[in-house]
């Protein structure tokens, strides 16, 4: 066996204090769970489908919005719908749906920690013995590496927003993290690992990623078959059965679908990878360089498999950041194995870059918050008024107290890290992880009202409801799912979004018109067609931050008379 490049003393293998680790996780997971509106896009779309299932407006086996099938993954939407039903008498549906997905994020953190712990305990991953003794014990070393992997996961920028949404991709992420743990633990926990594989692969397929489940299963079979470890070899039949079960489940539920992207822009893809995987990707490159002679060993091959599958899926789907997110568990594990080989100058560079960047981010958040509350500085307030016209700030003593405490904790963390050299392996990732947690907590406290105003559809729905009769259904033919979800959730209206909704019995109709760009002409033609069918425009509303689209509200009236020239042509007379 080729010796690994790690030299680690017992002092460097000290573990991160458990209270500090729990506070890191709490500061990362909890902000945004309570009090946040569902945001436009995948977050609101998925929640709208969960709410429709829970309220009986869509069947459990065919998620839909406004009567239009969405071809969505069943299991994640069932989870959200069941949570809404369980909490319908005690909490808001948005909060009820968000809670199980917050637990899935916690499961991801736990699975990454334990996967790294088992991988770092393997003989191939252990550091070299020191000439005069004093090297780290195997368990302490594995625990320190696992702490570093958890910090790397928290510090990854791309996971920050996507990991806090109520979407199927978060369920996929948890399933992949558990699958990685199962393969990592096979050498030490045979039966739990087999059970984990049997559950994780079918769950991954049921959550809308059958192709990734198949890729993981096939490549995992190859990896286990070629391994010298009895535990991994014994996992081969279980992986085979789990892969077949995942494929059969996807076939039964109709989950197989081509989601390939078109027109991939290499520059855009490169920019996505650079910021989405920061700051872990430089550490991963360092791991691959320093450990290149051991890439076939399972402590590197297993997380590398997960990362490569996600990168290929991202490229195949035209640069999808949601596909790229599924590689974050493997990315975090690989980044952690760079820690024993980093030089002191590298750790210092990471520390000072983190201090500068996240302190600047916190300062920007505070400056704009003070401007919203006091009007000073005027330039910051003018920026808010320009980007979110009509926004009225709110003062919450509780949120302000949490933000002050988090900022003070960041100052203490910076002081602790920069006072003197720390031998612990995980020291280089404390400031990046702490900075990400600080930024997210500040955004979800000081800026939460502003972000909800700008990114949720509540303000738009409230404006539309002023023109909609009570208890009446609303026709919204081919409307965006975010608008349908907003009308059903905030307005408690029955929405018909089918193609033929304009011919149904609903007394009012809403239509999204594009005022600029290539689609403007098509929108104008669609509006003219509605007027020709007897729909009379009564109002126009737009979201507070929308610049190119307007929502037009119609009510039924008499069909519009034909233009004189067209009438003459229809009658066969010259115009």
Image: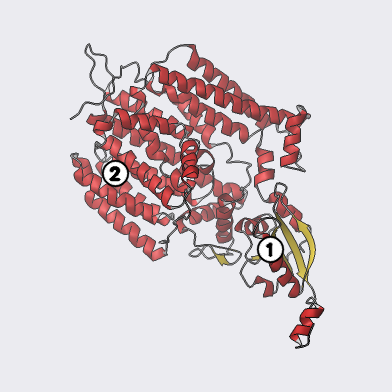
Residue at the spot of label 1: 521
Q: Position of residue 492 (x, y in %)?
A: 68, 59
Q: Quadrant of residue 338?
A: top left
Residue at the spot of label 2: 193
Q: Tell me if mark 2 has few (under 14), some (14-19) or many (20+) residues whose alpha carbon lies within 10 angstroms of its own.
A: many
Q: Nearer the viewer, residue 17 or 264?
A: 264
Q: Nearer the viewer, mark 1 or mark 2?
A: 1
For the residues labelled 1 and 2, the Cα–Cα distance comes to 58 Å
SS assignment at label 1: helix
The quadrant of the picture occupied by the C terminus is: bottom right
Q: Position of residue 438 (x, y in %)?
A: 56, 29
Which residue sits furthest front?
574
Q: Vertical placement of 310 versus 350: above or below?
A: below
Q: Quadrant of residue 529?
A: bottom right
For residue 313, side relative to residue 517 (left or right): left
Residue 156 appearing in the image = yes
Decide which of tag 1 and tag 2 comes sooner along the chain.
2
Q: Residue at x 29, y 34 (%)?
A: 119
For residue 471, side relative to residue 127 (left or right): right
For residue 135, side relative to residue 395 (left or right): left
Q: Position of residue 388 (x, y in %)?
A: 72, 42
Q: Residue at x 49, y 56 (%)?
A: 78
Q: Quadrant of residue 36?
A: top right
């Amino acid at each position: 066996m080729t010796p690994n490049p790690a030299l680690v003393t017992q002092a460097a293998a000290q573990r991160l204090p458990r209270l500090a680790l729990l506070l890191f996780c709490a500061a990362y997971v909890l902000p945004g769970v309570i009090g946040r509106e569902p945001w436009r896009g995948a977050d609101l779309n998925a929640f709208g489908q969960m709410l429709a299932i829970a309220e009986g407006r869509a069947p459990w086996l065919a998620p839909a919005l406004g009567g239009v099938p969405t071809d969505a993954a069943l299991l994640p939407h069932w989870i959200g719908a069941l949570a809404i039903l369980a909490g319908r008498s005690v909490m808001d549906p948005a909060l009820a749906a968000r809670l199980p997905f917050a637990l899935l994020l916690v499961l991801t953190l736990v699975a990454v920690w334990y996967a790294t712990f088992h991988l770092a305990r393997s003989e191939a991953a252990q550091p070299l013995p020191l000439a005069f003794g004093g090297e780290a014990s195997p368990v302490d070393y594995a625990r320190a590496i696992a702490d570093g992997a958890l910090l790397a996961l928290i510090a990854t920028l791309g996971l920050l927003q996507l990991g806090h949404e109520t979407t199927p991709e978060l369920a996929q992420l948890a399933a992949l993290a558990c699958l990685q743990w199962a393969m990592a633990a096979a050498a030490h926990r045979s039966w739990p690992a087999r059970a984990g594989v049997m559950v994780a692969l079918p769950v991954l397929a049921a959550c809308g990623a059958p192709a990734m489940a198949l890729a993981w299963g096939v490549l995992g079979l190859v990896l286990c078959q070629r391994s010298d470890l009895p535990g991994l070899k014994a996992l081969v039949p279980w992986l085979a059965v789990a892969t077949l079960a995942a494929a059969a489940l996807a076939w039964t539920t109709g989950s197989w679908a081509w989601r390939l992207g078109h027109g991939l822009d290499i520059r855009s893809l490169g920019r996505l990878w650079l910021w989405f995987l920061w700051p872990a990707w430089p550490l991963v490159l360092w791991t691959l360089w320093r450990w290149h002679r051991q890439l076939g060993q399972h402590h590197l091959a297993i997380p590398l498999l997960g990362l490569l599958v996600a990168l290929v899926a991202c490229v195949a789907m035209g640069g999808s950041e949601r596909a790229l997110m599924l590689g974050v568990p493997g990315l975090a594990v690989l980044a952690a194995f760079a820690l024993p080989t980093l030089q002191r100058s590298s750790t210092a560079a990471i520390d000072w870059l983190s201090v500068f960047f996240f302190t600047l981010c916190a300062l920007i958040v505070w400056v704009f918050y003070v401007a919203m509350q006091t009007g000073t500085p005027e330039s910051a307030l003018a920026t808010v008024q320009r980007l979110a016209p009509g926004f009225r700030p709110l003062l919450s003593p509780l949120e302000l107290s949490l933000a002050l405490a988090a900022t003070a904790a960041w100052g203490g963390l910076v002081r602790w890290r920069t006072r003197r050299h720390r031998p612990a392996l995980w020291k280089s990732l404390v400031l990046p992880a702490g900075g990400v947690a600080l930024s997210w907590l500040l955004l979800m406290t000081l800026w939460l009202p502003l972000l909800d105003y700008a990114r949720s559809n509540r303000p738009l729905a409230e404006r539309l409801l002023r023109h909609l009769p009570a208890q009446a259904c609303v026709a919204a033919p081919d409307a965006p799912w975010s608008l349908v979800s907003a009308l059903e959730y905030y307005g408690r209206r029955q929405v018909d979004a089918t193609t033929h909704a304009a011919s149904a019995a609903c007394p009012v109709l809403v239509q999204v018109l594009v005022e600029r760009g290539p689609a403007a002409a098509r929108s104008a033609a669609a509006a003219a067609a509605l007027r020709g069918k007897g729909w009379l425009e009564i109002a126009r509303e737009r979201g507070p931050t929308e610049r190119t689209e307007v929502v037009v509200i119609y009510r039924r009236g008499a069909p519009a008379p034909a233009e004189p020239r067209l009438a003459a042509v229809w009658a066969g007379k010259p115009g």
